[in-house]
């Protein structure tokens, strides 16, 4: 979800003068290990994922996860990621600190942060996060929330591109239900959205892409109220249920995403989401808390 979706918050996105053949998401999350600084990485914001006052929150989450996956001490695969958006990431370079604070037999616990220099050159934290990775083993398993019966992706028209927010063009979205309101008239009566989605152009699914896709839903308060009020994610947690093999099997296929708000009160609401692949396998769930203004 956007870090700030105020109607007055639109800003021109920075231009990347050196495009490469990498997929835009791989460019956006690319990190370089800093010499003589274990667990510290350098990165830079990407014009293609610009939102309104900073990068799309999902790509920020994906970048933090990239630091975990690139760390030489990594154990297992992602189990959960919690990202707290303390402030907007400014256009330009940043650094990521990834620290494995405890490693057990099958789980590993991480603290993460993104820092940028202020006007005086002092490092300022813009984002904090925690993550858990784990070595999974075969056990009894069952899905208790089946994928809803919905029309196939090819039966739903794709959202138009070029709507004014750059990061939206990095995704192909095909709404099934709960599309963004056409009239902001205050007549909203639910907050449920279902849509097929994938990277654009299509890209094989991995954990970083999945983390970003968990945050593509527009603010639930917009749908519930049919009013476009300023809103932005404060904190999001993504739970990864899929193994890397299941992500590989999903390939470049669509994911069905479903999101619903649960309680809207005193300037904040929470939102739950589920993501399935076309075969009906639940790959991830997420939960976030979002602020909104009148």
Image (cartoon, helix red, strand yellow):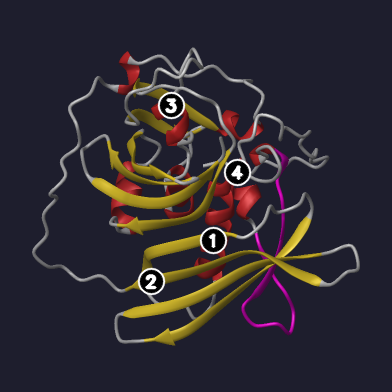
Say which of marks 4 and 1 sits in front. Answer: 1
Q: Are marks 4 and 1 in contact (CB under 8 Å)?
A: no
User: What residue is shown with label 3?
Assistant: 225
- Residue in front for this viewpoint, 17 or 272: 272
Labelled disc at residue 84 = 1
**Of 259 and 230, the residue lying toward us:** 230
| Number of numbered tags placed on the structure image | 4
Q: Earlier in the sequence, mark 2 or mark 3?
A: 2
Q: Secondary structure at mark 3?
A: helix
Contact, mark 2 vs mark 3 (Cβ under 8 Å):
no
Residue 116 percent location from the top left of the image: 76, 64
Give the left or right position of residue 282, taking residue 19 as reference. Answer: left
The image's mark for residue 56 is: 4
Q: CA distance from mark 2 to mark 4?
A: 24 Å
Label 4 secondary element:
loop
- Spatial CA distance of label 4 from label 1 is 13 Å
Q: Quadrant of residue 10?
A: top right
- 3 vs 4, front mark: 3
Badge 2 marks a residue whose secondary structure is: strand
Boundaries of the magenta span: 31-47
Instruction: Locate residue 205, reporting x and y percent.
Output: 42, 46
Upstream in sequence: badge 2 or badge 4 = 4
Percent x, y of residue 155: 31, 14
Q: Which residue is mark 2?
A: 133
In the displayed structure, 113 sits above or below 264; it is below
């Amino acid at each position: 979800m956007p870090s700030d979706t105020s109607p007055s918050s639109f800003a021109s996105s920075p231009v990347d003068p050196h495009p490469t053949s990498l997929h835009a998401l791989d460019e956006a999350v690319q990190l370089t290990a800093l010499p003589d600084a274990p667990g510290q990485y350098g990165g830079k914001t990407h014009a293609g994922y610009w939102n309104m006052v900073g990068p799309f929150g999902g790509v920020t989450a994906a970048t933090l996860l990239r630091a975990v996956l690139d760390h030489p001490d990594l154990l297992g695969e992602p189990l959960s990621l919690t990202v707290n958006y303390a402030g907007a990431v400014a256009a330009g370079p940043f650094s990521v600190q990834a620290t494995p604070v405890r490693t057990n037999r099958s789980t590993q616990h991480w603290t993460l942060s993104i820092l940028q220099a202020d006007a005086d050159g002092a490092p300022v934290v813009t984002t904090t996060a925690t993550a858990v990775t784990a070595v999974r083993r075969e056990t009894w398993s069952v899905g208790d929330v089946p994928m809803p019966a919905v029309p196939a992706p090819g039966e739903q028209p794709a959202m138009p591109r070029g709507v004014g927010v750059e990061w939206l063009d990095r995704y192909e979205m095909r709404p099934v239900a709960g599309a963004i309101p056409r009239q902001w008239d205050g007549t909203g009566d639910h907050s449920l959205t279902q849509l097929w989605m994938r990277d654009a152009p299509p890209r094989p699914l991995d954990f970083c892409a999945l983390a970003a896709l968990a945050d593509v839903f527009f603010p639930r308060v917009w749908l519930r109220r049919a009013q476009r009020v300023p809103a932005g994610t404060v904190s999001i947690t993504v739970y990864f249920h899929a193994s890397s093999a299941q992500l590989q099997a999903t390939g470049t296929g669509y994911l069905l995403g479903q999101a619903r708000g649960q309680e809207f009160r005193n300037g904040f609401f929470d939102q739950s989401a589920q993501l399935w692949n076309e075969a009906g396998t639940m790959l991830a769930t997420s939960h976030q808390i979002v602020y909104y203004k009148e």
